[in-house]
Image (cartoon, rainbow, N blue to C red):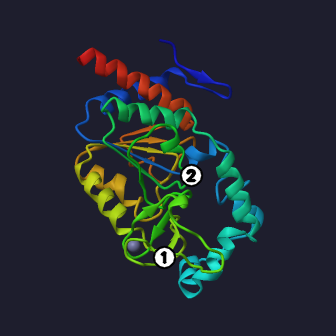
Amino acid sequence: MTPSSNTDFTLDEPLDAAIRRAGALVAGARHAVALTGAGLSVESGIPPFRGPGGIWTRYGEPPMDGYQRFLRDPRGAWLERLAPTEDWMRALADAVRAAKPNPGHRALAELERRGLLAALITQNIDDLHAQAGHASVLEIHGNHRLLRCIDCNARFEPEAIAVDPDRLPPHCPECDGLVKSDIVQFGEPIPSDVLRACFDTVARADVMIVAGTSATVYPAAEFPYEVLRQGGAVIEVNPEPSELTSAATLSLAGPGAAVLTRLLEHAIATQEACA
Ligand SMILES: [Zn+2]
């Protein structure tokens, strides 16, 4: 097989050799886990929050106490959700609605389908992993499509909750708790069920693929280092060097779509050679 390429990126031989080693690590893992972030969504057309072209760079930073504002005035927060007045919220909602999964999302879903990826943790809220066919996703920052009860953590499809503009906020049909967007806001704790599932799967991980994130924000920042402390391998997939690069077992410098597609091919080749 010749190295695959897309329109703006060609895998050279040294990178392809490193991806082959990464594919072998994944194929030989007992419990491989992936951690993904905004970089993977950028390749699907969703702008990042910060940096050049970032949503907050263009529209200004949102308040850093969004969750406290929600708790102070849940009705107001719901009215804002139903008819956003903030430009950055509208820009993000439009970009997320228009986005489609890219080959990186699909490669990870195929690794899962083949039994080569035990778990996927994402910082993204855009639902693209699920849309790519990924069956089980741990969404540490929630999912923009869903609603969540802040008391019992139950998630709901929007149509499952009657939203009456005259009787806001809606309440949980299971425990009568307050219902909000599943998106984890500034100041809001990561839902305890997701956090526990992340810690459980990371504790078992002997290989971790970190794609599209420099993993600098808690709790994700700890996960790769935890895998390394356990004697596992960390495979970084980022176009640019990050804080993780010097610590990672393998750093694959390229876009997630191209690199993960090739990693899947190598992992399958190893799997079939060992069968
Ligand atoms: Zn509830």
Residue type marked 2: Asp
Image location (x, y in percent) of residue 139: 44, 56
Compared across the picture, whether 80 is left or right of 146 comes to right
Asked which secondary structure carries label 2, the reply is loop
- Residue at screen point 52% across, 66% down: 161
Q: Amino acid at mark 1?
A: His
Q: Position of residue 191 (x, y in %)?
A: 40, 68
Q: Nearer the viewer, residue 183 or 81?
A: 81
Q: Where, quadrant-wise, is the C terminus in this rendering?
A: top left
Res. 177 image quadrant: bottom left
Where's ligand 1: which quadrant?
bottom left
Vertically, is 190 above or below 241? below
Q: Residue at x 25, y 56 (%)?
A: 200
Please tell me which residue lies in front, 170 or 139: 170
Which residue is rendered at x = 46% and y = 67% of the image? 148
Q: Which residue is mark 2?
A: 126
Residue pointed to by mark 1: 171
Q: Is there any visible trace of residue 251 in the rendered image?
A: yes
Q: Position of residue 179 (x, y in %)?
A: 49, 73
First of labels 1, 2 by sequence position: 2
In-image side of 261 versus 64 (left or right): left
Mark 1 or 2: in front is 1
The 10 Å Cα crowd at callout 2, few under 14, some 14 to 19, many 20 or more, is many
Instruction: Tell me the distance, in whole angstroms, between the alpha carbons under discs 1 and 2.
Output: 24 Å
Task: Please tell me which residue is depicted at 49% across the width and 33% down the height of the picture.
Answer: 106
